[in-house]
Amino acid sequence: MEDEVVELCRELIRIDTSNTGDVDGPGERVAAEYVAEKLEGVGIKTTVLESAHRRTSVVARIEGTEPGRDALLLHGHLDVVPAQASDWTHDPFGGEIADGCVWGRGAVDMKDMDAMILASVLDRARTGRRPKRDLVLAFLADEEAGGKYGAHWLVDNHPGLFEGCTEAVGEVGGFSLSVPGDRRLYLIETAEKGLAWMRLKAVGTAGHGSMVHDDNAVTELAKAVARIGEHRFPIRLTPTVRRFLEAACEAYGVEFDPKDPEASLPHLGTLARMIGATLRSTLNPTRLDAGYKTNVIPQHAEAQIDGRFLPGYEKEFFETVDALLGEKVQREFVHYDIAVETEYEGDLVGAMEEALTWADPGAIPVPYCLSAGTDAKSFATLGMRCYGFAPLRLPADLDFSGMFHGIDERVPVDGLQFGVRVLDRFLDNA
Ligand SMILES: [Zn+2]
């Protein structure tokens, strides 16, 4: 299992599944067929589905030994964000091993987890180790562009594939953050911010650039964009973030001050930026588009905003956005998805904690909120409680959050092997 996980990860990285947006990359179908063949090879029946040309996902169900229990979904996406090879130390689609790491696009996001799921499930099938509950596996297209051709499409068009699933386990959780005393926090994702990518439109009166002109779309839009970009939402401590910060402060031996949660951020090293973004909703202008000639005042001006709202604060978020827009600027969604938050308790969480502390006696499992989004949002709409748990024990000095979509994305080989041991142990008890 520990050798196979490394080979599976390397082979998946070598299949270029770049997702550039609405256009399909070269490889989602190839990767899906690769996964299906591996599963079929050990007698696991798969369903291969295509939402659009070559936008392919694979779903399989493994029957548990205790019928009548709720099913568990394990999901991973097969697509990756593009990579510019000239910027990288090693070929982003080479799956090379160097300096103790597997290098390549997808090494942490998330072909590592895909490989862990596969390696564990293949080994369990070969050795006749069946899970207690029904296990549904989903290897998905299109997560990196919001899941329109992957998780969302499957949930909308084939919800029956997930029948009986009450809980889901996916990415961006289970990784370690070193703290004093040779101990490590393991961040299990129990919440995600919602996302509102918005197009702003201002309409004014077109005219000659030499005139006195009071109804200028560019001016109105620019004012709204500046208001939005300068706005700071108040700090809102969600249950997940509070619990995370309390645990992190305890691990560092400092007092947690609920009145000043930002004071605990400097302890978190490279994770501080990401955790900091889970203390409040955010709005960032990202695109501007107006006009076509210097002496022509255009009738329209447009901008785009990347907005992220905390679980439980969606209403406050949109009321604020609308107040900031003013009367002359309208908004519409480029992409919208919900915020999710679930409790950090119950048998499934217990199984994650047990597996982590079994493999690492210095483990301190803690819940945390992801500042971005994953396919969990789709599965939450089917009523599942969603967790991010792709276990990785990481060296203290690795900038893990910087690996996501970054240059020189890589995963330590021993981290990957640790991960498959933990995931397999978790599946024994899940
Ligand atoms: Zn991902």
Image: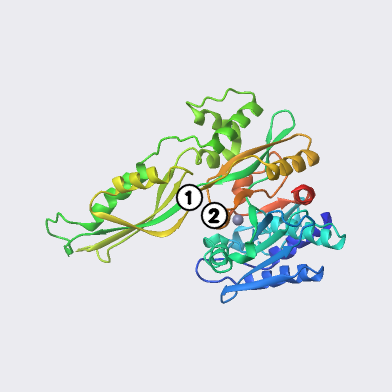
Going by the picture, which residue comes out furthest to the front? 68
- Report the label total: 2
Q: Nearer the viewer, residue 295 or 82?
A: 82
- The answer to whether one can see residue 394 in this image is no
Secondary structure under badge 1? strand
45 relative to 151 in the view: left or right: right
Q: Residues within 10 Å of mark 1 (few under 14, many from 20)?
A: many
Which numbered marker is on residue 396? none
Q: Residues within 10 Å of mark 2 (few under 14, many from 20)?
A: many
124 relative to 375 in the view: left or right: right
Whether pointer 1 and pointer 2 mark residues with C-beta atoms closer than 8 Å, the reply is yes
Q: At 67% across and 48% down in the image, what residue appears? A: 389
Q: Nearer the viewer, residue 188 or 385?
A: 385
Q: Quadrant of ligand 1?
A: bottom right
Q: Is mark 2 within 8 Å of ligand 1?
A: no
In the rendering, at what x and y percent does residue 128 appear? 86, 60
Earlier sequence position, callout 1 versus callout 2: 1
Secondary structure under badge 2? helix
Which numbered marker is on residue 194? 1
In the rendering, at what x and y percent does residue 173 appear? 64, 46
Going by the picture, which residue comes out furthest to the right? 127
CA distance for labels 1 and 2: 9 Å
Q: Amino acid at mark 1?
A: Gly
Task: Look at mark 2 in the image and give the residue it sits on.
Answer: 377
Q: At 80% across and 41% down in the image, what residue appears? A: 359
- The answer to whether one can see residue 129 in this image is yes
Q: Amino acid at mark 2?
A: Lys
Image quadrant containing the N terminus: bottom right
Q: Nearer the viewer, residue 104 or 370?
A: 370
